[in-house]
Image (spheres, rainbow, N blue to C red):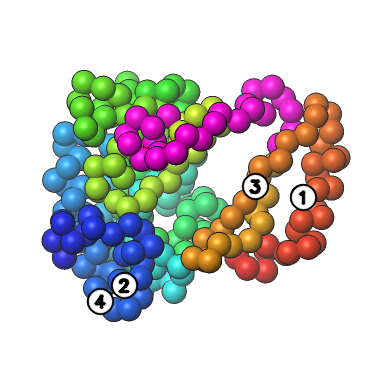
Amino acid sequence: MTFDEYNRYDATGLASLIASREVTAAEVTEAAIAAIESLNPGLNAVIAPLFELARGSVRAGLPAGPFSGVPYLLKDLNTWVAGAPATNGCRALRDFVPTRDSVLVTRLRTAGLVILGKTNTPEFGLNICTSPALFGPTPNPFDSQRSAGGSSGGSACAVAAGMVPAAHATDSGGSIRIPASNCGLMLDEIPFTPLFNATGAPAASVPLGSCAAGLPVGVQFGAALGREDTLLRLAAALEQAAPWHQRI
C-alpha cells in the first residue's frame, strides 16, 4: 500500500478495506509506520514509537472490532501501555514505565485499533501549545512557524499530516478543539462548553448508543453545585433504559 493509497481513506474507510480483505492489517500497519518515519522527524508529533508492539499485535491476530487493523496513536497523557513510557510530558516521569495497560487502552485494542505510538503533549496537558521541555515543540504541520495547539497537539498534528487516520485526544478546556482548529481538522465551529472541572460543578459523560456506522454516541450532562444526586439519577435512568455495559 503506497502513501497516497493509505492517505486516501479515513479510519472507517480503512476498516472497510480490511474487513473486505482488499488489504491486510499488516499492509496498512506498514504503510502507517512508513508515513510516521517519513513525516515525524520534521514534526515531532510522535514521541514514543511502538512499531514492534504494533507488528506483534497484528501477527497475533486482532479482535473483530469495528476498527480492526486501523492504525492509531495515543496522546501521552494518563494513558498506560504496558512496557511503554507514560510521561504526561513531564521530565520527572521520563523513566516511568507501567506494567499494564489502562482500561482505555484495553478497550481501544478490543475495538481492533493498532496502537503505533504515543504523541506529544505539554506537561500534564496544562498549556494550549505543545512544547514540553521533555520532548520539545510540535509545530503546525502546514507552517513550522506556527503552533499545532494544545494540549492534544501531537495527535492533531499526526492526523493532519497523514501519519494516521485517527488519534486519541482529551479535552477539558479546549485541548482537542484548539489543536483541531489550528491543524485544519475542525470544519465547523464547536463552541466552548462550561469548564465543569474548573468551577467545581458536577458533570458526567454518559453513553447513549451507536450511530449508523456503529460508533458510540454520548452526551455530557452538568448540574448545579452540590447537586450530584440529580446527575447520578439521570445517568442511572439512561443506563436502565439502554444498558450500555451489555454492548461493550
Identify the residue under disc 3: 219
Nearest-to-viewer mark from 3 and 1: 3
Sequence-first tag of 1 and 2: 2
Measuring from the top left, give residue 137's x and y in whole percent: 28, 25
Q: Which residue is mark 2?
A: 18
**In the rendered structure, does residue 194 fall within the stretch colored magenta?**
yes
Question: Tag 1's secondary structure?
Answer: helix
SS for callout 4: loop
| Rendered location of residue 122, percent (x, y) | 39, 26
Q: Earlier in the sequence, mark 3 or mark 1?
A: 3
Location of mark 1 (residue): 235
* Image quadrant where residue 18 sits: bottom left
**What residue would you read off at disc 4?**
22
Residue type at mark 2? Answer: Ile
Q: Residue 80, image x and y in percent?
A: 46, 46
Instruction: Read off the magenta span.
Output: 178-203
Callouts 4 and 3 close, C-beta under 8 Å: no
Q: CA distance from mark 4 to mark 3?
A: 35 Å
Label 1: how many Cα within 10 Å (few below 14, some 14–19, many 20+): some
Is residue 60 part of the magenta span, yes or no? no
Three-letter residue code for mark 3:
Val
Whether pointer 4 and pointer 2 mark residues with C-beta atoms closer than 8 Å, the reply is: yes
How crowded is the residue under tag 4: few (<14 C-alpha within 10 Å), some, or many (20+)? few
SS state under label 3: strand
Q: Residue furthest bottom?
A: 21
User: Which badge, 4 or 3, comes first in the chain's sequence?
Assistant: 4
Q: Is residue 128 left or right of residue 201?
A: left
Q: In 3D space, how far apart are the residues under numbered discs 4 and 1 (Cα atoms)?
A: 42 Å
- Is residue 154 in view from this perspective? no
